[in-house]
Amino acid sequence: MNRRMILYTLCIVMRVEAMFMAPALIIALVLGEKAAAYGFLLSMLLLLAASVSTYFARPHKRVFYAREGFIIVALGWVSVSLFGALPFFFSGAVPNFIDCLFESVSGFTTTGASVLPDVEALSKSLLYWRSFTHWLGGMGVLVFLLAIMPLSKNAGYSMHVLRAESPGPEVDKLTPRMRNSAVILYVMYVAMTVAQVLFLLAGGMSLFDSVTTAFGTAGTGGFGIMNDSMASYSYYLQNVTTVFMILFGVNFNLYFFLLMRKFRKSWQNLEFWVYIGILAASTVLITINVLPRFAGTRDAFHHASFQVASIMTTTGYATTDFNLWPQFSRTLLMILMFFGACAGSTAGGMKISRLVLLCKSFVRDLRQMVRPRSVPVVRMNGSLVASETIRGARSYLTVYFMVMLAAILLLSLNNLSMETTVTAVISCINNVGPGLDAVGPMGNYGVFSGFSKLVLSAVMLIGRLEMFPMLMLLMPSAWKR
């Protein structure tokens, strides 16, 4: 194992995080938020001091393989979460460090679960940083690092990092050079974020609100700057957010194909159509179910479409308290938490492509039982799926439910309702944010003990990195030379 390369990369990640705190520090200084400015300044100094060891950790060979890639990603996310919590703590805005850590992990993993009962009491600079962690975590911290500088001259090595951080059963390069692929992804990401900001400004939203809302939408995170999330804004602003939540839930590879004028390849993508089909069907069903609770079909459809898009893309914004909706609608929303959106997007959950792949492999197994001598295959978008990919999807599903059940058991020590305990874990492992009952859209995760918040923080990280990178840290064999 190239341990010096791991430490070298982590030090670079720390410098990048310190750089990203600079805008929040400037906001604090301009607005005269002295406590927040002190928090950001001290956090940046600690990050830069920790990254000084880069000089001593400079590796002799920038060579690393899958094992190092997984560990770099896992430790990178743990470190950015720990340091990202410091501004909340040093500023005194959140006195309990476990709460600060929970808020930071929730931000970077784009979960959007919060322990803060009064979000509006935070300073503007802290609100900006809180929302910006969504934006940075949405596409990936290490993907950004690959976009601005190569970790290795060999693109094959960098692919190990991208594969460990990017969501979905398979990861494809957009171009032969890994760095070019990362740059293209971030250019599209920035362009879509700017587009949403412009649409929100056109609807009368302030610049600060537009930027922070776009950060939460782009990263499909859902940290709101209002206590009622998005309920205070107009229908136009809510509709813009609905559309962009759906767009950010689409595989970014499809946008690249559209830019390259490969329209047929985008049009024939099965995952996209399943994603749109589930969104449409769920919206219609919930609209019918909640119709008696609203003034008319228009209002019912508006809120149903927003909440379906928000939950399925694991964004977590809310325009109303869906915790009060009929049981059918609440159950359907909970099921959508599992589904998530497309692989290669900023959304959490299992991913539609993985679910489609598992369904296809199940049908293949049934056919083989009926005709034992046949050799049926699984295809996705006209291409043959390797058996290793199918095994990986099944392994993911097994570990997914094992982690979820273990977390539910540990959270049950709080003696809260079953609905609160189960939906809190489901929401955190799928990086959704709101659950039901006490952790509903108008509630928060402050009801849990410090131990439970640490468990949920670990669950959020495990879910965001799709199980294996975080769990590999616990394997002694992974650390052997």
Image: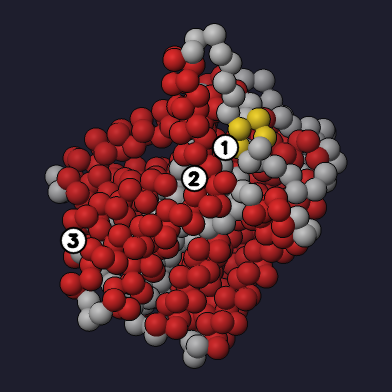
Instruction: Specify whether residue 178 is in view.
Output: yes
In this rendered view, identify the residue nearer to me: 344 or 183.
Answer: 344
- Residue drawn 60% across and 71% down? 193
The answer to whether 167 is drawn above or below residue 101 in the figure is: above
Instruction: Specify whether residue 163 is in view.
Output: no
Residues under numbered marks 3 and 2 in contact, where contact means CB atoms less than 8 Å apart = no
Residues under numbered marks 1 and 2 in contact, where contact means CB atoms less than 8 Å apart = yes
Please give left or right for residue 115 compared with residue 460 in the image. Answer: left
Read off the residue under disc 3: 326
Read off the residue under disc 2: 351
Where residue 242 sits in the image (x, y, percent)?
Answer: 46, 70
- Residue drawn 44% across and 15% down? 370
Please give left or right for residue 273 compared with residue 156 in the image. Answer: left
Where residue 136 sits in the image (x, y, percent)?
Answer: 58, 60
The 10 Å Cα crowd at callout 2, few under 14, some 14 to 19, many 20 or more, is: many
The amino acid at mark 1 is Pro
The answer to whether 171 is drawn above or below residue 332 in the figure is: above
Element at label 2: loop
Element at label 3: loop
Where residue 388 sits in the image (x, y, percent)?
Answer: 60, 24
In this rendered view, identify the residue nearer to me: 378 or 168.
Answer: 378
What is the quadrant of the N terminus in the image?
A: top right
The amino acid at mark 3 is Pro
Read off the residue under disc 1: 169
Of badges 3 and 1, nearer the viewer stands 3
